[in-house]
Image (cartoon, grey):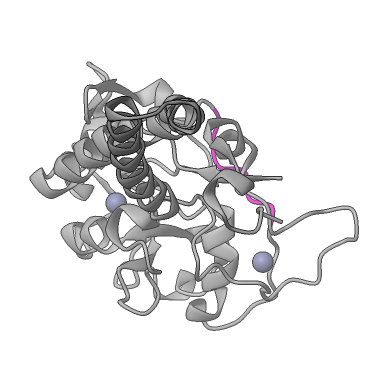
Amino acid sequence: MTVRIVRPHLKLPQIPFHRRHRPPPRQYEGYTPCLRWEFGFVCAMCLLHETDYEPLGVMRQARYWIEHLESQVAAPERANDYDNLVWTCGRCNSHRRSRPRTTGHGSILDPTVAAWNLHFVVEGDRIKARPGDPDARYTHELYDFDGPDKVGRRARRRKELTWALQYVTEQNLATRDALNRNAEASGPRRIHFLQHAREVQRGWSGARMVLLDHRFLPVDRPTRCADVPPRWLRLHALPPELERQAKRVPAALLGVPPDP
Ligand SMILES: [Zn+2]
Ligand SMILES: [Zn+2]
């Protein structure tokens, strides 16, 4: 009975995104719901979560797009090939434009084949290519992994969520204690505790808002996609790697229904 929240700190996947969806052939835009679940609502390149850009849902604002690893210019025959498609934020997508998959300097890494932590390292809110890894350097450069806007969004998420997660766990208890003591106290002590309880309550509703703005399963997540899956396969689940990364907060604490 919990709600999954995006983790505050940047963490690189230790295994590649393994494709679970097998949608039948169609125009590539039709794969959008599959790709969003496939990549766990995260940009496959810079790893920003959809809610880092738009807590109310990225689809209304078209802030995330389908990226063709082999560009449509270079390989028009692969435009609708599901295995050629990944989910990326608009900034990564537009920074590459249609520059080639492979040049003399390196080749774009495929996040469904390569585990990011073998090619990159985290430094604070930045992602650095590992030394002597030309493909990592090329990918980093083409998608502008550490553009100022992206680093800023990672930093804001880290600060806000670290505070909010701590607040709802620790301060929630403080509120209860303050209210209990208030019930027992009298005179000036009673007023003091009442003020304290009000302050905590105000902070707490701020923290609750921050957490609800960073739900791992966004408000506009699709409920169906193009596949007819075998019954044992749960398609509408986060990739296992991201499931492990998610923070879980009791739904009752946030006053919302738990994640399915
Ligand atoms: Zn699907
Ligand atoms: Zn991105």
Q: Quadrant of residue 207?
A: top left
Q: Tell me residue 156's x, y (percent).
A: 21, 41
Q: Tell me residue 149's x, y (percent).
A: 13, 49
Residue 33, compared with residue 46, is above or below; it is: below
- Image position of 68 (left or right of 31): left
Q: Residue furthest bottom?
A: 27
Residue situated in front as seen by the camera: 152 or 47:
152
Q: Residue furthest left?
A: 148
Residue 3, compared with residue 130, is above or below; it is: below
Q: Tell me residue 103's x, y (percent).
A: 22, 45
The residue depicted at 31 percent of the width and 52 percent of the height is 52
The residue depicted at 41 percent of the width and 24 percent of the height is 117
Residue 78 in magenta stretch: no
Residue situated in front as seen by the camera: 25 or 106:
25
The residue depicted at 53 percent of the width and 32 percent of the height is 245
Q: Which residues are magenta?
A: 15-20
